[in-house]
Image (cartoon, rainbow, N blue to C red):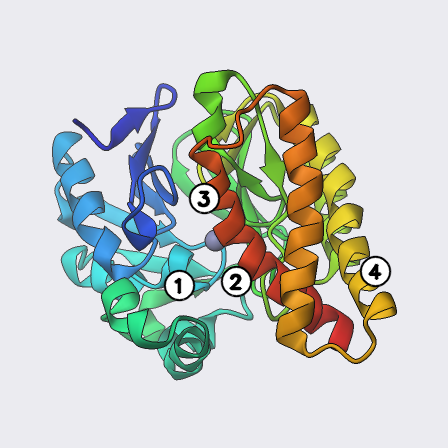
Amino acid sequence: MTNLTQLNERIFLIDAHDLGRKARTGSYIIKEEKITIVETSASPSISYILEGLKELNIHPNEVEYIIVTHIHLDHAGGAGLLLQHCPNAKVVVHPKGARHLADPSRLMAGAKAVYGEDFDRLFHPIIPISEENLIVKEDRAELTIGPDCTLVFYDSPGHSNHHFSIFDPVSNGVFTGDTIGVYYHELVKDDIELFLPSTSPNQFRPDAMLESVEKIKSLQVTTIYFGHFGMTTNVNEVYKQISFWLPIFVNAGKESFAEHPLASPSEHKNMIKELILKKVTSYLDERNVPRNHDVYEIIELDLDICSMGIVDYLLK
Ligand SMILES: [Zn+2]
């Protein structure tokens, strides 16, 4: 079975099997005059990207740009390793992310704090990228990758401060990383589109996230390419659901803090997770999704990290 899906005339999605899971984190290949990859996932995912390139008859030497929407390891952890295979490429990153790709020690320490002894299996190796191989793109900066294709970068904080989204004029689409949420691919076969915000630590800011939603909405795109996972053309549903769920996520945190002033951060995390999970479950119940559906495993995993981010935000 192939991990490569053609999304439209010139954009392909590779399932990068982040954390060893299917349909979790994707890399996009834009087949333009200058071959461009968007998102690398972590280092264990790079073999999937190389396989995908092979299937497309693209030699790694032909790759000119590797763009990472933000520097979290599930989006950029493998960029240094991929660059070793693609010696002619440059890595394109948000101005606030560049120094962490050049010196990943802080990124690694952060991930070790969250993933503990699983760190090596999930993320090793994290290879520094020398500054001459980095290209920084400020808000509204451009990158021409083909005769008719100039990508535009939009600063899009909320999930993290080092996050941009990338507008592709040819497909009238935008690569949003984690800015405007996660698309639960497991429900696509049931004809249900669920989009939940990604509020992970430690730079989550709900106001900035909503502003980023508005900014992306104003681009009037017809396609959204998510970091997790895949694309949708039902863009208004994305904006609607993120604006609906985000206050529910934050209010779960406020409720936990108000009702249990003496609870520890990890107790808050668990209470917040339970509160949000209850709302998501009733939303899915109404749509006849059985409680033993695969999607719940992923939702619980995500809500665990999201709840940590909410605790972190409320403690600041
Ligand atoms: Zn992510």
Circle 3 packing at 10 Å, graded few (<14), some (14-19), many (20+), is few
Q: Residue at x 23, y 71 (%)?
A: 125
Please name the amino acid that badge 3 sits on.
Glu
Return the disc, 3 or 2, that comes first in the chain's sequence.
Answer: 2
Q: Report helix, strand or loop for mark 1.
A: helix
Disc 2 marks a residue whose amino acid type is His
Q: Which residue corresponds to the image point at 83% horizontal and 76% vertical from the top-left? A: 261
Against 15, residue 142 (above or below) is below
Q: Which mark is residue 73?
A: 1
Q: Relative to 238, is 31 on the left or the right?
A: left
Q: Position of residue 271 (x, y in %)?
A: 69, 61
Give the distance between the C-alpha atoms of the residues marked 4 and 2, in whole angstroms. 34 Å
Q: Quadrant of the C terminus?
A: bottom right
Earlier in the chain: of badge 1 and badge 4, it is 1
Closer to viewer: mark 1 or mark 3: 3
Report the mark closest to the observer, 1 or 4: 4
Which image quarter is the N terminus in? top left
Q: Is mark 3 within 8 Å of ligand 1?
A: no
Give the spatial CA distance, label 3 vs label 2: 32 Å
Quarter location, residue 133: bottom left
Q: Which residue is mark 3?
A: 297
Q: Position of residue 114 (x, y in %)?
A: 45, 72
In the foreground, 93 or 127 = 127
- Can you give x and y, in whole percent of width and height, for residue 10 in the image? 34, 25
Can see residue 32? no
